[in-house]
Amino acid sequence: MVNLNNTELKQKIIERLDLSNFSPEEQSKILFLLMDNVSCKLNMAILDRLTEDDRRKLQKLSRAGGKKVLNFIGSRVDNFSLLVEGVTKQTVDDFRRVRQLKVNS
């Protein structure tokens, strides 16, 4: 449904993580998985905030994709950019906690 700007999302994730101990291949894999997770969680959060009618409209728009989808979501979801930031931060924080647990065990 939502296809976020990958460069922007990667930058936000990199800022929150220290991936310097990983190879470039591992960094890319971690970023891909985290971005996918953020996208899934964000889609769920968006759907939770839409009416049934808006969900149907979004489904029709999502077939075309692109800016129309983001514009529609932005017009229906209050503080959409804050939602994106919050979901991204929470997902990265969850990753950091799991990573720290593995390091400590």
Image (tube, grey):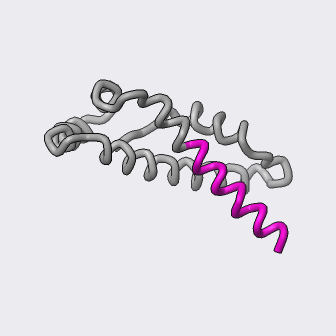
Which of these two is toward me, 67 or 92?
Answer: 92
Left or right: 94, with 16 as reference point: left
Left or right: 102, with 56 as reference point: right
Residue 102 falls inside the magenta stretch: yes
Q: Quadrant of the C terminus?
A: bottom right
| Residue 99 falls in image quadrant | bottom right
The image position of residue 30, as x and y in percent, is 66, 54
Residue 67 falls inside the magenta stretch: no
| Residue drawn at 35 percent across, 27 percent down | 74
| Residue drawn at 57 percent across, 37 percent down | 9
Up the image or down, 30 lies above or below 65; here it is below
Q: Quadrant of the N terminus?
A: top left
Q: Main secondary structure of the magenta part?
A: helix
Left or right: 104, with 68 as reference point: right
Left or right: 52, with 7 as reference point: left
Outermost residue, bottom side: 105
The image position of residue 36, as x and y in percent, is 51, 52
Up the image or down, 71 lies above or below 104; here it is above
The image position of residue 73, as x and y in percent, is 32, 32
Number of disc labels: 0
- The segment highlighted magenta reads 88-105
Q: Is residue 29 visible?
A: no
